């Protein structure tokens, strides 16, 4: 089983002096699964750089539904609006995998961005990656079937959990993918029959990662390519 590395890849990519200065302004916090980290339109007090935790960024709809637009783990950060001069988030951030994270106050984050060219370069690169992944997510939702989208989502979650064992109910998966629960039930059932995963009482165990990659749409690899080309 993969173990969660207690590092954030964006921070780790900084030159040592910039990295040490930035980390000195941060505190380590524990983020609890299912907690809402930020609501859309509410003032952001902090930026977060996950270490072991990972979160879902979603756009709440007018009728009460939500649709996931991105997933963030130790490869990224939450708080892009602060880097762009805004004070609120257009998305809801919900913790879907509990764990530790570095947290920095909004004022300190902006000060460090102003003082460090290396930090600005990394954050600007991550903004570019996020825009590309948002566009890829919209394309995926519109054009691809539920089974391919579910396979893609599970692979992204496994990457951020650093574990082949994920804890999600079928209802939660349906909400995040913006589909009916019956669609998730049918897709997950087919994946079990093909021995790609095992699903029991809210626990998904990935058995065949290569098989999931083969089933997923090209959006999974496209999202990885955007990241690697920009920040790798």
Image: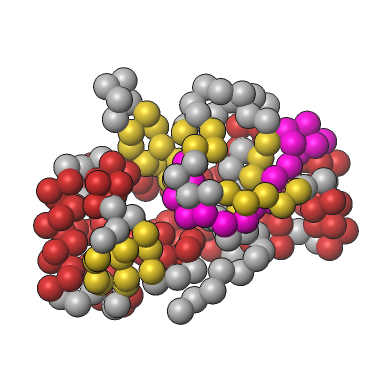
The answer to which of 31 and 126 lies nearer the viewer is: 31
Q: Is residue 105 magenta?
A: yes
Residue at (66, 64) in percent of width and height: 7
Q: Is residue 214 magenta?
A: no
Residue at (46, 79) in percent of width and height: 1
Residue at (57, 57) in percent of width and height: 99
Q: Position of residue 9 (x, y in %)?
A: 64, 61
Q: In the visual, does 230 lie left or right of 93?
A: right
Which quarter of the picture shows residue 178?
top left
Magenta span of residues: 94-111
Q: In the visual, does 4 lie left or right of 171?
A: right
Compared with 226, 1 (above or below) is below
Compared with 52, 198 (above or below) is below
Q: Position of residue 29 (x, y in %)?
A: 67, 49
Q: From this viewpoint, is residue 6 visible?
A: yes
| Quadrant holding the C terminus | bottom right
The answer to which of 200 and 78 lies nearer the viewer is: 200
The answer to which of 48 and 16 lies nearer the viewer is: 48
The answer to which of 181 and 7 lies nearer the viewer is: 181
Residue at (49, 76) in percent of width and height: 2
Which quarter of the picture shows residue 89?
top right
Display coloring:
secondary structure
Q: From this viewpoint, is residue 214 visible?
A: no
Magenta stretch: dominant secondary structure: strand
Q: Position of residue 101 (x, y in %)?
A: 64, 52
Q: Position of residue 79 (x, y in %)?
A: 61, 38
């Amino acid at each position: 089983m993969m173990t969660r590395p207690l590092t954030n890849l964006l921070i780790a990519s900084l030159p040592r002096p910039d990295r040490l200065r930035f980390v000195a302004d941060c505190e380590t916090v524990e983020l609890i699964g299912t907690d809402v980290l930020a609501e859309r339109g509410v003032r952001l007090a902090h930026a977060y750089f996950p270490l072991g935790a990972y979160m879902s960024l979603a756009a709440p709809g007018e009728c009460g539904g939500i649709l996931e637009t991105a997933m963030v783990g130790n490869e990224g950060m939450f708080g892009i609006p602060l880097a762009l001069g805004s004070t609120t988030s257009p998305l809801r951030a919900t913790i879907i995998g509990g764990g530790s994270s570095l947290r920095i106050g909004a004022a300190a984050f902006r000060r460090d961005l102003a003082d460090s060219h290396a930090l600005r370069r990394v954050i600007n690169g991550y903004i570019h990656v996020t825009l590309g992944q948002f566009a890829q997510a919209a394309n995926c939702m519109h054009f691809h079937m539920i089974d391919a989208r579910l396979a893609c989502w599970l692979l992204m979650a496994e990457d951020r959990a650093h574990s082949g064992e994920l804890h999600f109910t079928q209802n939660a998966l349906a909400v995040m993918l913006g589909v009916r629960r019956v669609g998730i039930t049918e897709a997950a059932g087919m994946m079990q029959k093909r021995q790609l995963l095992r699903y029991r009482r809210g626990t998904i165990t990935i058995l065949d990662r290569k098989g999931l990659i083969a089933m997923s749409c090209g959006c999974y690899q496209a999202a990885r390519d955007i990241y690697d080309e920009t920040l790798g």
